[in-house]
Image (tube, rainbow, N blue to C red):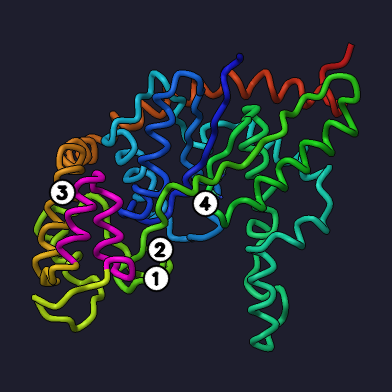
Amino acid sequence: MSKQRVLTGITTTGTPHLGNYVGAIRPAIEASRDTNNESFYFLADFHALIKCQDPAAVHQSTTEIAATWLALGLDTDNAVFYRQSDIPEIPQLTWLLSCVCSKGLMNRAHAYKGAVDANIAEGEDADKAITMGLFSYPVLMAADILMFGAHQVPVGKDQIQHVEMARDMAQRFNHIYCKKTPLMTLPNYQVDDNVAVLQGLDGRKMSKSYGNTIPLFLPEKKLQKHINKIKTNLLEPGEAKDPDTSTVFQLWKAFANEQQTAEMRQAFADGIGWGDAKKQLCALVNEEIAEARERYEDLMSRPADIEAILQQGAEKARAVSVPMLAEARKAVGIYGLG
Ligand code: TRP
């Protein structure tokens, strides 16, 4: 069987947190070790501009996210690891896809629709503060995916619709331009239900937009401080606690093996104090990430080396994107005369 091409993008806003690690980075790095897969992972920095107009923040986040993936052991000999903006073919394909993508489809994209609905609810103009970037975001994402002929696109639930839209655009393009041999591979989304969606400090989903995250590579003391801020109830040591409604236990489970999980479940029943449970949680998380944190700090101190790795990745990615774009241009009738 030919290899499955697995592709996903990481928008370069914010600092990676435990939720990103457990929900996306750890499973992606594991998947990249599977020799049946060919992994393409990239920093979606053009997508970042839709959410963030602070240049220093976009730049810093790009450095931090690249360093995080490398520090956690992404093997860049196996996986193609690159930055979206280093692939000049992507914006060109975005345009070709824009010209087969109906506006009505984009009207239904939930990020855009949500912004319109919020404006209307507030009695504002429907399009207030909505950029063309936000509106056509799914076309850029489709270009990311279709450029590399991805079969599988691991994403969070909120991105399923975008992968379906990419599939739609691929079908439109094939239907209009490639009746005989379809050029575009139809992608599938991959949502892993076994991967935990972590709760944040306040018990809601851990997310930068809620300001409730625990950054991944905090020094141990700060990690403990953050963990101490996790919301708990007022039960005292000695009183039995319910693990299944506890954020502390949920985080524990995401880092523990089966036996450790069973032991902590018992400790909750036996009335472990919150302070004690949080201490143990910090030690467990720290054990898993301590080595990577050292590598992270080292990488962050030599960004030029990160850059060199990204350039090598871009070279490998362009070995695919250059011929693909040439095919796509030819399909639409844009190629040399004579
Ligand atoms: N939009 C995705 C997110 O916000 C990031 C992304 C950009 C992406 N391009 C992609 C994900 C292509 C998968 C495939 O999470």
Q: Which residue is mark 2?
A: 207
Residue 242 as seen in the image, left or right of residue 220: right
**Secondary structure at numbered mark 1:** loop
Identify the residue under disc 1: 204
Residue 183, given in percent of the width and then of the height, sits at: 77, 24
Numbered tag placed on residue 156 in the rendering: 4
Please give left or right for residue 45 compared with residue 29 in the image: right
For residue 300, which numbered disc appears in the image?
A: none
- Is disc 2 in contact with disc 4, using a CB cutoff of under 8 Å? no
Helix or strand or loop: what does disc 4 sit on?
Answer: loop
Question: Disc 3 and disc 2: Cα gap in Å?
Answer: 21 Å
Q: CA distance from mark 4 to mark 1?
A: 16 Å
The reply to whether discs 1 and 2 touch (Cβ–Cβ < 8 Å) is yes
Q: Which residue is mark 3?
A: 286
Q: Residue furthest top?
A: 338
Answer above or below: position of 309 versus 284: above
Q: CA distance from mark 4 to mark 3?
A: 25 Å
In the image, what residue occupies the spot 73% across and 21% down? 326
Indicate whether 194 appears above or below 313.
below
Amino acid found under the numbered disc labelled 2:
Ser
Q: Is residue 266 above or below residue 204?
A: above
Label whose residue precedes the other's in the sequence (4 or 1)? 4
- What kind of element bears circle 3? helix
Q: Amino acid at mark 1?
A: Arg
Sequence-earlier tag: 3 or 1: 1
How far apart, in angstroms, are the residues tagged by discs 2 and 4? 12 Å
